[in-house]
Amino acid sequence: MSNKGPVQQEMESLLAAAFPDANFTLSNDSASHHGHMGDDGSGESHFSLAIEWAGFAGMNRVARQRVVNKALGDLPGQRVHALAIRATAPGE
């Protein structure tokens, strides 16, 4: 049984579809931001993503974040207040 909420599940599905050969971990950090700005009470407002994907090779940090945000569509900024992204290529 998963304790992941619907937003986290949707994010993981979108990431798996966009980066099928990537290794990633998506962590819900919302509990540590309870009561802070951006906390909407849903328990799914703040996330951290660590993703390793060969396709990131040759991209700078900003380009990598743009690719990830594009894959997530309207979630960042709409239903997710904050997403910390650590995007690396294998061997980095």
Image: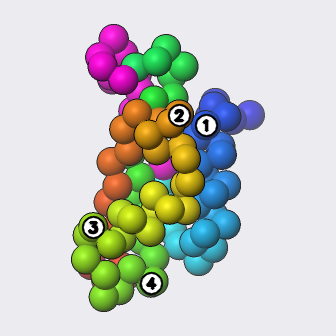
Mark with earlier residue (3, 1): 1
Element type at marker 4? Answer: helix
Magenta segment range?
A: 26-38
Spatial CA distance of label 3 from label 1 is: 24 Å
For the C terminus, give its image quadrant: bottom left
Spatial CA distance of label 4 from label 1 is: 26 Å
- Residue 7, above or below 74: above
Identity of the residue drawn at 63% across and 57% down: 14
Q: Are marks 3 and 1 in contact (CB under 8 Å)?
A: no
The amino acid beneath tag 1 is: Val
The residue wearing badge 4 is: 54
Spatial CA distance of label 4 from label 3 is: 16 Å
Element type at marker 2? Answer: loop
The residue wearing badge 2 is: 79
Q: Which mark is residue 7?
A: 1
The residue most toward the top is 35
